[in-house]
Amino acid sequence: MASFDVPVTSSGFGQTSRRDAWWLQPVATFLGLSAFIVYSTWAAFQGDHYTYQGYLSPFYSPEIFGPSAHSWFGPKPAWWPAWLLFSPALLILWAPGGFRFTCYYYRGAYYKAFWADPPSCAVGEPRNAYRGEHSFPLILQNVHRYFLYLALAFILILASDAWKAMWFTNAETGAAEWGVGVGTIVLTLNVVFLGSYTFGCHSLRHLVGGGRDILSSSPLALKLWKRVTWFNCRHMRFAWISLFWVGFSDLYVRLCSMGIWSDWRIL
Amino acid sequence: MPDATFRIWRGDASGGALQEYPTFYENGMVVLDVIHKIQAEQAQDLACRWNCKAGKCGSCSAEINGKPKLMCMTRMSDLDVSQPVTVQPMQTFPLLRDLVTNVEWNYRVKQEIKKLEPRKPDAPDGTWRMQQADVERAQEFRKCIECYLCQDVCHVLREHHKHNEFAGPRFLIHIAQLEMNPLDVADRVPDLKDRHGLGYCNITKCCTKVCPEEITITDNAIIPLKERVVDRFYDPLKKLFGG
Ligand code: SF4
Ligand code: SF4
Ligand code: FES
Ligand code: FES
């Protein structure tokens, strides 16, 4: 790189000539993400109240092992060590968690809000040393595309949960019947929002066509790339909407299951 | 005529201070107009660089109330004049005098980037054919006016002084423009990782926020380049299957 040894000035932590509320956005990010982390961790450790009728909380889906009727492979396996806490959520949450943690949008946002690197644009930083994503540990963020593959599978699973949330047991005949409850809408919106977030992923944009220099020779790649680009332009918005909604979906199922809220049957 | 107080940085590399200039301005004026007015009426030796007064030459970059901006595109009517308006030179480059910095480092960085290397001509008359769909992406980056405001705000340069290891957002879009060019056959991916220090960018998007040409630097250039580097160096499956 072009050699450059003229001294330039650094600013101290928080030092800036900006007069606007530059701290507002990082503080809002900090509070929003912290609230989600606290709630989702709490909810994941509960191991209870995550189903109601045909509804399954997205924090617990897929339920690989577990006591509910949604479980893929039956109850908690006998070989599970007694000392190790069991919750069906803990078996799977690392995948969507890792997807968000390594998401390009969230990375930029939490480097600012949680690590002050920088606290905000043109505002001084607390540390001089800097490695960025150039070397260990943050170079590991490059695994993002692998989490994308998992996240795409989760969209299919959550879509099937939304479908299952449309089936109710008739109280008199005991037969399954199609219907729509408020919970059905909550879980359907959940997969729509999560899909809108996932389909705007930068790694997906690269995968479907962005990695090529000549797109016009493959009309399908061009079309997909344009679609993903549409979502990608709104990636931050869908990141927040889907984050809020997935938490709310868990809360909804939880409160219904605890008998605090009652689910309205619309159709 | 409304009045305003300007606090302008005066000095050179050996030192200096913000000085206050009470002044008047007319509706419709931009910050550069007021700087010229102060220059004409109160401080004939005030150094500032400008050329087009139309947001196209990229000369009048400065920090207005702490925000990197073009002086000629910042309207007085958009500023709160109940407090003094601060005008400072760009922090990331060596100061020459007052509002003028030495941006020569940028030209040296550009020289280190592999030039366009077109494939063999498509037609016997030595010409090429391109589709609009393929050039659109690169065209966004051609809007750059080289004002270096993005370089100024980028914390990798501004706070961490990685000038010797990191090319900065302006040149990452330049590389993206070449890499995505449908005619180009040169390979800049290894250089991106090592020589141009792409990994130093932590995608905090300050460059995108300040760009007067509204180029989506981080999302449309830097992240796609990061993905190309992942393809080549950090994706074990791609390595295994030679993708
Ligand atoms: S997104 Fe990257 S290049 Fe742009 S200002 Fe931030 S660190 Fe610098
Ligand atoms: S990318 Fe934008 S901010 Fe950076 S030099 Fe070009 S015009 Fe200026
Ligand atoms: S970039 Fe945000 S999900 Fe991939
Ligand atoms: S004077 Fe040319 S961009 Fe401001």
Image (cartoon, coloured by chain):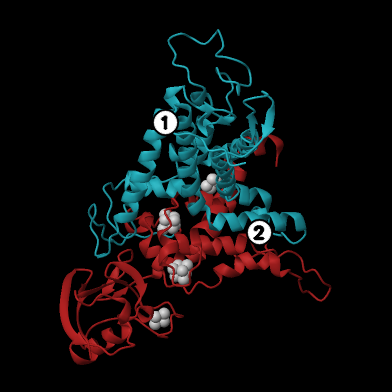
Instruction: Note whether residue B107 is visible.
Output: no
Q: Is residue A64 above or below residue A242?
A: above
Relative placement, left or right, of B151 versus B120 is left
The answer to whether the beta carbon of the residue marked 1 is less than 8 Å from any atom of ligand 3 is no
User: Which chain is in cyan here?
Assistant: A
**Percent position (x, y) of residue B26?**
28, 90
Q: Mark 2 belongs to which amino acid? A: Lys
Q: Which colour represents chain B?
A: red
Q: Mark 1 belongs to which amino acid? A: Ile
Q: Is residue A80 above or below residue A239?
A: above
> Dividing the image into four equal quarters, which quarter contains ligand 4?
bottom left
Q: Residue at x 26, y 60 (%)?
A: A9
Q: Nearer the viewer, mark 2 or mark 1?
A: 1
**Quarter that holds the N terminus of chain A:** bottom left
Q: Chain of mark 1?
A: A
| Label 2 – label 1 distance at C-alpha | 45 Å
The answer to whether the beta carbon of the residue marked 2 is less than 8 Å from any atom of ligand 3 is no
Q: Mark 1 or mark 2, which is nearer the start of the sequence?
A: 2
